[in-house]
Image: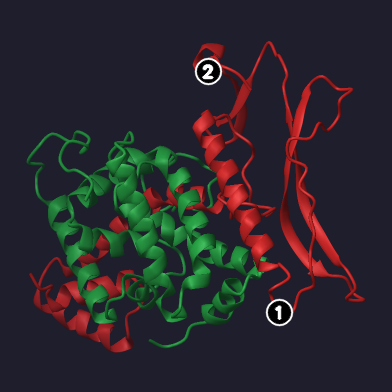
Amino acid sequence: MTSSPDDALLRLAAAGDAVAMDALWRGHRRWVAAVLLAHHVDHQDLDDLLQQVAVTLIQGLGALVDVGAFRPWLRAIALNAARSAGRRGAVRRCLEHTVLDGIEAPDSEHVDRRVEGRDEVEATMSQIERLPPELREPLLLRAVRGLGQREIARALDLPETTIETRLARARRRLRRAMAAPATSPMTNGCNRRTLP
Amino acid sequence: MKPTREDVLISRVVDREEAPTDWRELDRLAAARDGLWQELLQALRQDAAVRAAVAPALAAADGRPLPGSLGADATPVRGSSPSAWVGWAAALLVAALWIAAATGPNRPGTDAIAVEPTAMTPASPSDPSVLRELSRVVVRARPTDDGRAVEVVYVRRVLERAVVNELYEITKDEHGMPVPSPIDPARFARPSSY
């Protein structure tokens, strides 16, 4: 795997540089949140799980031998945290509720103004819920600013071409689903699936 | 199920990763099939919806600093369950241990550092609200300019008790602005002891 601009930061952080560790976390926490979201972490749990991931990052980075494997390593930590939360039987709501909680905040710089309304977002997220995880995760990761196909490929430890294919498949499924008439009432999808 | 060439081209445009040749190919395909441009439009709209839906989670991440850091992006203290506070206390402890280990005498390039813990010691006996001072949390340690000492930045944590008539937590109003909201005292289980 090729070196990345993160490598120097990683080495410093692994050697105990607190400033580097802090910068490393700032640079990666958003996509970690997207991974957690893709694996059905409830917004109420998200904060605690981000904390868990950060703590594990601090504890384990020094033992990471291959800095090139950092993103897959961090993703694995996030997945473990999400699964642990599921095993503990933590209260979970479906993804559409999770992401809609703050959608109307007008001062949020993150909210895309092109979205017409809550209904459209709700319908889209309802369909994303139905995507298989291998399509859902890259799709949500792509929503993180600055995270291109190359970075997603590194995080998921997959070839870029695979990511491109999965994104195309995910988007096609969404288009087809949105174009088709609803086959079931648009209720929340909490009972349709369980955590992986 | 493999995506079609059209699917791939649309996805590239959505991701702004298309090449000039992709546009030409898309134009040619659209000339042969009605509705392709509409599909692209729909894909762009859906992408905007996905980004909007993920935004709250990203905002939550932005407000979550590394445990133990004093970053400017730390969120205001909010009301939460005791278990959450225990979690953060554990996180701070881990951060303190990590920093202490990272700056300890066995590490090359740093001098020895001694931070006296003051756990379990009364901080201010004259003030009945102070229960005790917890161990200090080191957030930064670096050699002084002359290299003969270490400058340490740390957090002193004082455990206090107070009886209040009203308690508030920081929530958000309909505009997403932080506002204080009263908390029902019945929400808290009565602790057995401190």
Q: Is residue A119 visible?
A: no
Q: Quadrant of residue A174?
A: bottom left
User: Residue placed at 26% from the left, 71% from the top?
Assistant: B11
Name the outermost residue toward the right: B146
Give percent across and percent down for residue A177.
14, 52
Q: Position of residue B144 (x, y in %)?
A: 88, 70
Left or right: A154 in relation to A191: right
Q: Residue at x 61, y 44 (%)?
A: B75
* Chain whose colour in the figure is red: B
SS category of the residue bearing label 2: loop
Q: How is the image coloured?
A: by chain
What amino acid type is highlighted by mark number 1? Answer: Pro
Q: Amino acid at mark 2?
A: Phe
Q: Is residue B32 left or right of residue B110?
A: left
Disc 2 chain ID: B
Vertically, is A73 above or below B25? above
Sequence-first disc among 2 and 1: 1
Residue displayed at 86% across by 29% down: B124
Residue corresponding to mark 2:
B188
Q: Colour of chain A?
A: green
Tell me how far mark 2 sits from mark 1, CA to CA.
48 Å
CA neighbours of label 2 inside 10 A, class few (<14), some (14 to 19), many (20+):
few
Quarter of the image where the N terminus of chain A is located: bottom left
In the drawing, what numbered circle is on residue B108? 1
The disc placed on residue A147 is: none
Q: Nearer the viewer, residue B95 or A75?
A: B95
**Residue A95 at x, y = what percent?**
30, 43
Cβ atoms at labels 2 and 1 below 8 Å apart: no
